[in-house]
Image (spheres, grey):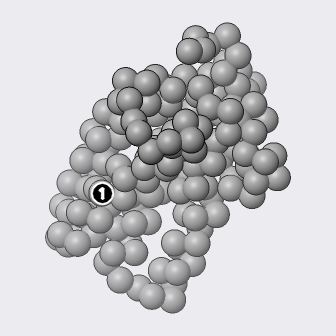
Amino acid sequence: MKLSAHLLSATIISTSTYILTKSFVISITSLFSGILIDVDHLIDYFIEKNSVSINIKEFFYKCHNGNFRKIFLFFHSYEITFFIVLLYFYIQNDILLGLIIGVWSHMILDILYNTKINFSKGSVRIVGYSFFYRLAKKFDASKFYDCSGMDKN
Ligand SMILES: [Zn+2]
């Protein structure tokens, strides 16, 4: 899902969270976590380029076209989202609750937008959101992301 869509959805979700909870901490944490989870795309970009320099146009092009040999996406994983929930059962605080709302809503939207039942062009296998699955596939993007027929650059 594109950054602009995440900015809009995270803003709507954090505003709704504030209306429901009256907690600025929960609301602001959900806003930032719902957007900043995508920082792992930047990490993948740096790894792919083997450099920490960034060309913004190229970065967004590569992200939107799945133009990566390896996809790590450390934060986009079922394991992280469930770990946050597990942690919340032990340490109940507003920051963790905001993280759950932000990260889960982001992941749900990404999964709805990026996965297709038939694993067709431009889609991600639903198991591709598992960190351990990606690890088992040695983070080889072609094993869980179908970018066949898409514009490669
Ligand atoms: Zn995302």
Q: Residue furthest bottom?
A: 90
Where is residue 115 shown, x and y percent of the image?
Answer: 63, 33
Q: Is residue 107 visible?
A: no
Q: Residue at x 18, y 61 (%)?
A: 19
Q: Amino acid at mark 1?
A: Phe
Quarter-of-image position of residue 5: top left
Front in this rendered view, residue 57 or 98 = 57
Q: As displayed, is residue 128 above or below residue 115?
A: below
Q: As displayed, is residue 148 above or below residue 1?
A: above
Please state if 147 lies on the left or on the right of 33 as rendered: right
Q: Is residue 94 visible?
A: yes
Q: Residue at x 70, y 16 (%)?
A: 148
Residue hosting label 1: 32
Where is residue 120 shown, x and y percent of the image?
Answer: 71, 21
Q: Residue at x 62, y 31 (%)?
A: 68
Front in this rendered view, residue 53 or 117 = 53
Q: Dot 1, how many residues are within 10 Å of its Cα: few (below 14), some (14-19), or many (20+)? A: some
Quadrant location of the C terminus?
top right
Quarter-of-image position of residue 15: bottom left
Where is residue 24 shown, x and y percent of the image?
Answer: 17, 69
